[in-house]
Image (cartoon, rainbow, N blue to C red):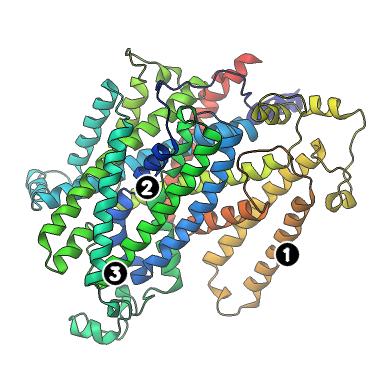
Amino acid sequence: MLRQALHRFGQKLVRRRKLEQPVAETASASKLSTLDLVALGVNYTLGAGVYFLAGEVASNQAGPAIVICFLVASLSCALAGLCYAEFSTRVPYSGSAYLYTYVTMGELWAFITGWNFIISYVAGTASVALAWTLAFDYLIGNQLFQAHGSVLLHVPQILLEYTDFFAMGLVLLLTGILALRDWQSILVTKLVTLVSFLVLSFFIISGFIKGDLHNWKLTEEDYVKAGLNGTSSLGPLGYGGFVPFGFPGILRGAATCFYAFIGFNNIVTRVEEAQNPERSIPMGIVISLLISSLIYFGVSAALTLMVPYYQIHPGIPLPEAFLHIDWKLASYVVATGGLFTVFTTILNNIFSTHQMISVMAKDGLLFHVLARTHTSKDIPVMAIVVSGIMAAIMILLFELIDLVDFMLVGILLTHSLVATCVLILRYQPERKNGGNEAQVQEENGGNEAQVQEENGPEAEKLTLQGLFFPGSRTPTPLSGQVVYVCSSVLALLLTLLCLVLAHWPGLLSGDPGPITVVVLLLVLITGITGVIWRQPQSSTRLPFKVPALPLLPLLSIFVNVCLMMQLATGTWLRFGVCILSGFALYFGYGIQHSHLEKST
């Protein structure tokens, strides 16, 4: 009895959604072109990251090497973007990575993906609101925080240190606006994106004109002239040159810079609104990432050329850079551009969060009341209100950099799950009975016994020779299961490798212990990758496929995990608490009220 109960429980965790079931419909009747999707992608990414976070990375983490940090972060996003582009052609429905994971890996992983998305974008909403407050305070002459301090003289110190009531009020105000009116306007998004592009282009050109290449070659003499000497070791200032904080600084900076690219994957949530989504979604993702990468590279280069990295203002670096060269009017122009851009980013984050909450509630994994609509415009008011309240609470509890790191770990984990899904699905068997390709793939994953009956009565047996020389040129249930298991093992081995590389100091000193561990892990990873490479791939034609399987998805997982390992222990503890609360919600409510539970 116990064994049967455990088996049924395990089956619930891996049950997969059938795409012929009703999928969340979008309320918008308009159709988005490729240009619209590119504008959305650029608007999602060119937010707080470029206007505010660049100063933190350049001054405290990487110095002029911030340009390398953005290149590493863009590489990670490009790999993830390719995976998102393929799954958007396979599963042309709204729901982003959540639905794709539900179709390919099962309900538990889908809940983890969706819950990560929600808490990450709630943290993103809170962090962007705090960033908006910085820009607004700059425009009014830094009066806000002076008043803030005088009003809160009698508030306990812990609240004074971690609270920004102005940002919380802004989030609650925008939440109320979204609850009464569907804000999503493509025309407004295009205009804001154009303004941001022009402002940042002006900053880049100005930086290259007024910049000094010597700021990329600073020495200790420059610190002495600036009055920053005192010890032979410069400590928190770094050690001069282009890479003052060394290679660890580049890795930590790259992890933080990844925040700047968060949002491009929201293009996938607009699949049902897109014209010809099989073509426009992949193009929108790739083009928006390319544009954002070029702008980030230009802004970071211009910033560190205009101002020595140790003099960069961490909070509002771009306006302060113009003050450094005595261009006061330009500083206000850039601050105003950042104000409008970040304002729309807050709205986009709240919109994406409540959309995910609504989709999961309709699937029964969250409380069904969150999916109810209370207006004639079919707006999920409860989902919007809950997302706004969650963001407001995070503003009360965390500082800006803590929110950034918190969002990073969730999004990087989601990107890794998407890469794993692409790797697994490409090697799964398919039924040759026509119909939607995504339906075919899902039905195979959800009912392998039926596939086996259609392929023939003979039972496949796993042999060592069959791992490297499979007898079929098309995927079979056995080969699909081999890839599933190998992919899971590879994810674990890559995580262990990143842990060793990031936290074993003896590796760089030539200690044979960690070197032996790394070599052993690399041998195992290479061997298992070879097993996956030898398995037959699906021959189904798609408008876009990730090239060089299985290498690119595995590289995406490796880069994502490496960046996650750069985050502080406190970030992991906070993230762990949120994941545990999600598990409590799923096992206490979602697993029993899932639509798949009702259908069985």
Report the side of 133 relative to 479 (left or right). left
Q: Is residue 380 above or below residue 240?
A: above
Earlier-in-chain disc, 2 versus 3? 2
The three-letter code of the residue at mark 2 reads: Thr
Label 1 CA crowd tier, 10 Å (few <14, some 14–19, many 20+)? few
Residue 239: image location, x then y, percent: 34, 79
The spot of residue 586 in percent (x, y) is 52, 28
Q: Quadrant of residue 357?
A: top left
Residue sitting nearer the eye, 309 or 151: 309
The quadrant holding residue 184 is top left
**How far is mark 1 from mark 2, CA to CA?**
38 Å
| Residue kind at label 1, given as amino acid type | Val
Q: Is residue 534 left or right of residue 324?
A: right
- Residue holding disc 2: 45
1 or 2: tag closer to the N-terminus: 2
| Label 2 Cα crowd, 10 Å radius (few <14 / some 14-19 / many 20+) | many
Q: Is residue 183 above or below residue 413?
A: above
